[in-house]
Amino acid sequence: MVSFQNTDFLLGLLVLVPITLLFVLVLRWKKKVKKQIGDEELVNALTSDYSPRYFNYKFLLIIAALALCVVGAANMRTPAPGNTGNRTGVDVMVALDVSNSMLAQDIKPNRLERAKQVLSKIIDKMGNNRLGMVVFAGQAFLQMPLTTDLGAAKLYVSNASPDAVPTQGTVIGDALRLCNTSLDTKEKKYKAVILISDGEDHDEKATAVLKELQDNGVVVHTIGIGSPDGAPIFDPGTNDFKKDESGNTVVSKLNEQDLQMIATQTGGEYNLFSTADEVANRVAASIDQMEKKQIGGTGIRVYNSYFQWFLLVAVIFLILEIIIPERKMKWLSWGK
């Protein structure tokens, strides 16, 4: 169905009425002046090259161009095919580990950069789902509440770093609990958590909070970033690898067991990082299979707009108005 985005702009067409009246008055004034000059045959001889018809054509082109500009500004549009304006999806909270262990370089350039890369690709595949984000290390912080603004989500991801959390460690339990409370606790479905971590530290709180997640119908998908063999943790502050109290280099290893347990107990899937595209496709496919709810009321309807065609024709008319002279041209028979 055809509609206009800015219907108020159509009132601009009323301006064409006084302009047309003014044009009529100018024509009458010209005739009156012509008679007042005197000898009509002499006046016609002196103005033989002048074409009243061209003058009328030029005015009609200007009026038409103005009308097209007004209609273009009102933006005629039709609903895009297959788009009903209803958005269905699920609520997804992301828990991103930004602890210092995520700076280990067993996955180049380091675990955190790879985690951010895969998360960015997952966001690209979120579609109509709402997304929120929690970052955690020794503490968990809500970085972004649930939103459909996926562009803002990618901005938060790009800025994630160990500096975002002052206390170091890996409190997965606190992160999961914060994700749980950020979701609608009244609903027992339509909810998921994506946990991205190396799971380095065993967190007993994580086991305890899984019951809460299960009771609220939250499915947790986990992504393991790192390798079982591990790697030293680079410390940007000292420009060297992190050492323990005895002076030995600390090696951070991927804790797959805890991450697999979290996913299994909540009905989710564990994914070991391989490539960003592969992991993102698997996680997005798992979320897409979930039962969906209506997101954001009637949602956002997509339209096809046609304002550019009105403006294009208006420009063509204005160019023609400039090209057409008021003097008669012998090669144009309609200018008599």
Image (cartoon, grey):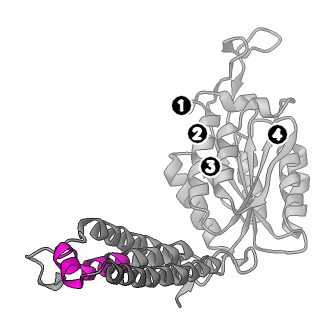
SS at mark 4? Answer: loop
**Residue 294 visible in rendering:** yes
Q: Residue at x 66, y 77 (%)?
A: 87
Image x and y of residue 29, in percent: 42, 80
Overall secondary structure of the magenta section: helix
Image x and y of residue 138, in percent: 86, 35
Image x and y of residue 155, in percent: 66, 45
The first of marks 2 and 4 along the sequence is 2
Considering only vertical position in the picture, is 114 above or below 71? Answer: above
Label 3 is placed on what type of residue?
Leu
Label 4 is placed on what type of residue?
His
Name the residue carrying label 2: 114
- From mark 1 to mark 2, how far is it between C-alphas? 8 Å
Considering only vertical position in the picture, is 158 above or below 260? Answer: above
Pointer 1 and pointer 2: residues touching (CB < 8 Å)? yes
In the image: residue 183, left or right of residue 330: right
Q: Where on the picture, by quarter, is residue 36? A: bottom left
Task: Give the magenta range.
Answer: 39-61
The first of marks 4 and 1 along the sequence is 1
Q: Where on the picture, by quarter, is residue 193? A: bottom right
Q: Nearer the viewer, residue 124 or 217?
A: 124
Label 2 is placed on what type of residue?
Arg
Q: Nearer the viewer, residue 43 or 224?
A: 43
The disc placed on residue 202 is 4
Q: Residue at x 50, y 53 (%)?
A: 278
- Residue 239 colored magenta? no
Disc nearest the viewer among 1 and 3: 3
Q: Nearer the viewer, residue 108 or 44?
A: 44
- From mark 4 to mark 1, how far is it between C-alphas? 24 Å
